[in-house]
Amino acid sequence: MSFDGMFTYGMTHELNERITGGRITKIHQPFKHDVIFHIRANGKNQKLLLSAHPSYSRVHLTNQTYENPSEPPMFCMLLRKHIEGGFIESIEQSGMDRIMIFHIKSRNEIGDETVRKLYVEIMGRHSNIILTDGLENTIIDGLKHLSPSVNSYRTVLPGYDYKVPPAQNKMSPLEATEDDILRHLSFQEGKLDKQIVDTFSGVSPLFAKEAVFRAGLANKVTLPKALLDLFGTMKECKFAPELTTANGKEYFYLLKLTHLKGDGRRFDSLSELLDRFYFGKAERDRVKQQAQDLERFVANERKKNANKIKKLERTLQHSENAKEYQLYGELLTANLFRLKKGDKEAEVTNYYEEESPLITIPLNPNKTPSENAQAYFTKYQKAKNSVAVVKEQISLAEKEIEYFDQLIQQLSSASPRDISEIREELVEGKYLRPKQQRGQKKQKQHTPVLETYESSTGLTILVGKNNKQNEYLTTKAAARDDIWLHTKDIPGSHVVIRNSDPDEQSILEAATIAAYFSKAKESGSVPVDYTKIRHVKKPNGAKPGFVTYDSQHTVFVTPDADVVIQLKKS
């Protein structure tokens, strides 16, 4: 993983510079595995994210805004009791492991000064956040509990002594010499990057591959030099945080990764780098867990309508044979004098064609010639009438597919709050049954909360992330002369600039946001229409969020997550 022991070393150094001595003013736990500390340090307010997420564990300062639950979890209440209002005296790393230790001085209930240690273990699915008594190192509590039956090496439960995860007995890269490298690496065995990982603590495969690449032709001269140069850069804290995109994947590290052939973007700090890399990723994972049933339901409904259209098209094709039934009825009527009851077929002249060819018409022998003719006229009338009905049903099914395509797009960029609104919408549309427990009062309708952005010239930009928000934004929140934007013929969010005459830069930035929150998020050039709200109308009986518009202009933009992050207001 990219957040290895080296990255932990760099983050420890960065946090010591920026928040040591700071006061913890608030503590929140917006999600099961994430804790947010609001810290007043160096004359400004900062937010520190501690995450023990199984896939996205990390520690860094963040500018993102997180919605807090109405009732704080028990672990959050415990942290508030013991360390809220306390001061961060120092932050250290446990060896070169992915463990950060926050030394916090605070006061207990009766005002006596106390010392606490907060251990943040960044170890994938084994990640944890553990608070201990700073003097005796007794566990007060942990975000995740480990009983003796689960882990025989150490127990993470209140009252037990804190014990670090088992040591791997590797060499510290910050103390390594050329002799150490030559003594521990075998240049005849190959797989030098793996040997480096196995030899030095805190070193990930990403770091090892970079060292081997920088060595060029790796041998006893070039590889020790490349390794010592990288170790020296780390020791001197000369970090160069960079996000590299290669082979369709993103990689972050505190050094430039020259072995990855791709585009790189430099950041001013490790925290800014992580804020950008994890933007939306952890939230997307949480949303996926909450919305699995919705995603499955919406996909099934779309599939049902697609199959319905196929069947209706076959019916339509059959109905288009109506003229043949009319022809049979007319030819039989003209030849009634030649036919009799019991005939199984009639060979008659088709006088509607120039050469008047003979055609054979199947007959029901149990009916008279007149009844056979009438039967064909009846078939003709039914087929003719069904064409209009079938076409109408196809049109309705196509609108349903368009609606579910829109929901699929919205689910792909939804927040946990957006999921509940999408679920409400499907209940109101009679697609889902309401989940109301016995004795539970019906919840009042709430006003949708819109995401707010600010253009580089200071204009407010509002975004709807689902149909309820889109409808509220377009029909109620926006003024008649505000500028409305939407991707052209592509499912996406409604975007409004709160200004009647915005500058060109603001329009382009708002269009970039509209393209980012659309089905064309991964495209290179996306057409976005914009017009005044006065030209946007909702047809009678239309589904939530569906509108028509005119008098529009079109711009082409490239969806860019960096622009969206930069413009979002905290």
Image (tube, rainbow, N blue to C red):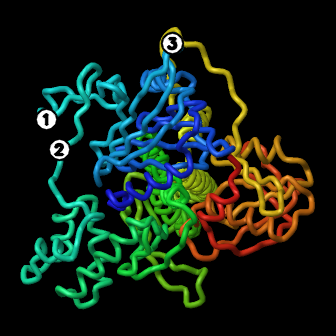
Query: Which residue, given by chain and number where applicable, does mark 2 sit on?
Result: 166
Task: Please tell me which of labels 3 and 1 falls first in the chain.
Answer: 3
In the rendered structure, which amino acid carries the disc numbered 3? Answer: Glu
The answer to the question of whether label 3 and label 1 lie on touching residues, with beta carbons closer than 8 A, is no
Residues 247 and 373: in front is 247
In this rendering, does residue 336 appear at all?
Answer: no
Q: Is residue 99 above or below residue 245?
A: above
Q: Residue at x 30, y 83 (%)?
A: 213
Measured Cα–Cα span from mark 3 to mark 1: 34 Å
Circle 3 sits on which residue?
Answer: 109
Q: Please tell me in which quadrant of the rendered image residue 43 appears.
A: top right
Label 3 secondary element: loop
Q: Residue at x 22, y 72 (%)?
A: 177
Question: Looking at the picture, does residue 524 appear above or below residue 451?
Answer: below
Amino acid carrying mark 2 in the image: Pro
Which residue corresponds to the image point at 26% horizontal and 80% vertical from the top-left? 212
Q: Position of residue 193 (x, y in %)?
A: 21, 74
Which residue sits at x=73%, y=53%? 453
